[in-house]
Image (cartoon, rainbow, N blue to C red):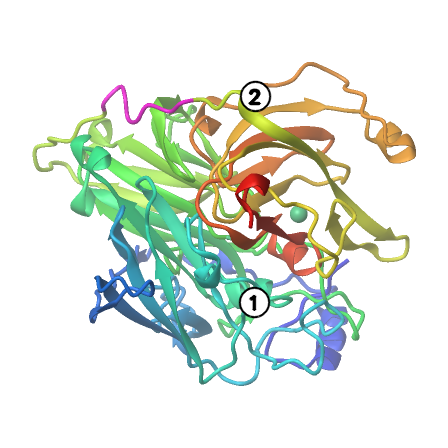
Amino acid sequence: MAASLSTRRSAGEAVAHSKVAGLQARWSANALTRFVDPLPLLETVQPTGRRPTPDHSGAQLPFYKVVMSQFEAKLHRDLKPTRLWGYGARSPGPIFDTNSGQGLLVEWGNDLPAQHFLPIDHTIHGAEIHQPEVRTVVHLHGGKTPPASDGYPENWYAPGKSVVFHYPNHQDATMLWYHDHALGINRLNVLAGLLGIFFVRDGQEDSLKLPRGKYEVPLVIYDRSVDEDGQLVYPVSGHSESPWVPEFSGDAIVINGKIFPYLEVEPRRYRFRILNGSNGRLISLTFNTGQAWFPRFFQIGSDQGFLQSPVSVMRVRLSPAERADAVFDFSGYAGTDVFLRNDNLNVMKFRVAAKGSHDDSALPQTLRPIRRISEAEAVKTRSLTLVEVDDSSRGPITMLLNNAHWSMPVTEDPVLDSVEIWNLINLTGDDHPIHLHMVRFQILDRRAFDSSLYRATGQLKYLGAALAPAPEEMAWKDTIRADRGMVTRIIIPFEGFLGRYVWHCHNLEHEDNEMMRPFDVVPHPRRRR
Ligand code: C2O
Ligand code: CU
């Protein structure tokens, strides 16, 4: 069992504190008054000028500068300000609103303090005691980005430094997100607040006449625990040498930086751009109108862009790092309150005005044609296991991809412009959101198998028929839930750039403790010199 550590206490004091806390009802942010803070509408960052492209072609690209720093912000009206880390002194960071094909440059500065305020586990690879305590590197999640700008976990830098990354942006319209990716402390950096969203727009999206402007609302959702002083709380294992815990689950749901926010809306269609930015929590969202049933709405896109057609849903489920693009019509609810509900808790309120402006938005039947990649196009199939290394006294101590540690030689080496099928064989008792950098992929199916037989003999025996992906998973994806006891098959065209990237579990506690591997996109052998 994980003990609770107020991040302002030392580890020793925390152990003493947790013994006391076990006897008392623990204070929870869920006791705060609900729906008193307006939903923050995240600001958009503007370029400060233009700079030459890194390829020396002479072209000029928009140039942005964003600095990471420590600051305080109120997560709720009745909480004291919370110490946070963020981009541009905000958490979530500012929105990038960019156009497909229009490359850009971002200078990411690190102005963070030299000391971390969350418990580092120095036994974890990359976070050894001789490393600087605070290290950061930004990754644009879902970006088709050259390797030097991708935020490789070992390319971190310490406070006082900055780097310029190049995002060519040659990809379909969607909502990406940027977040920290420093080896061994990524979970702590993201939890401290280092994340933000990045829109890519294109002509296809424009032609659809979806709700836009103030009727398009980003919702960055994650869970956090705070103490009565408003400070972030992160659990520790109780082993003072190795405080890492295998899971984080916060008490409260934070949306765009507020706990229990509300939003005034008009009785018309809205487009919500939703990110699950949690370290490890699956979110399951419905709209609650006070009726016994949940109203239906449309999911129109996923991680890497539009679904072919809108899918009518009553719930959106997102693993960490997954995104949903959804349209909800408030026109039947004029003058009432509608709630956004996660699991069984109303986490946000929409106050629907009695009247609104004329709604000229549309919801077309075809959003973007998606060609399904056929299995016959794959030149290679890889079988990759997800495993948990247990210690009987402590539970899971590490999780691995294909039984390999981070530092072992690269084993996944797809050829540029080839198609591969990856079979994710989940031998653990958990579902894991698996993410590949640089590429987008499609899910083929999920299929139950005999995991004890596999563990004993390496033999793959299926226990049932292959299950087709859910209709809302039929868009291009960059993160996929690999369910426990299942083989999840994805098909991946390796298009983009040569070079070294990573693939990993996006449960950040898992990722930090070895559930991440490098992969190399390599040239075709006949084209190699
Ligand atoms: Cu969201 Cu490796 O990334
Ligand atoms: Cu995992």
- Residue found at the very far left of the displayed protein: 358
Residue drawn at 29 percent across, 32 percent down:
328
- Type of amino acid at the residue the image marks with label 2: Glu
Residue drawn at 49 percent across, 41 percent down:
478
User: In which quadrant is the N terminus drawn?
Assistant: bottom right
- Residue found at the very far top of the displayed protein: 465
The majority secondary structure of the magenta stretch comes to loop
- In the rendered structure, which segment of residues is drawn in magenta? 364-371
Query: Quick one: 314 or 381, which is closer to the camera?
Result: 381
Q: Is residue 482 above or below residue 529?
A: above
Residue drawn at 42 percent across, 81 percent down:
111
- Residue annotated with mark 2: 375
Percent coordinates x, y for residue 390 in the rendering: 85, 51
Q: Spatial distance from mark 1 to mark 2, Cα to Cα?
A: 35 Å
Q: Is residue 227 visible?
A: no
Circle 2 SS class: helix
Circle 1 SS class: loop
Percent coordinates x, y for residue 240 in the rendering: 78, 75
Q: Is residue 192 visible?
A: yes
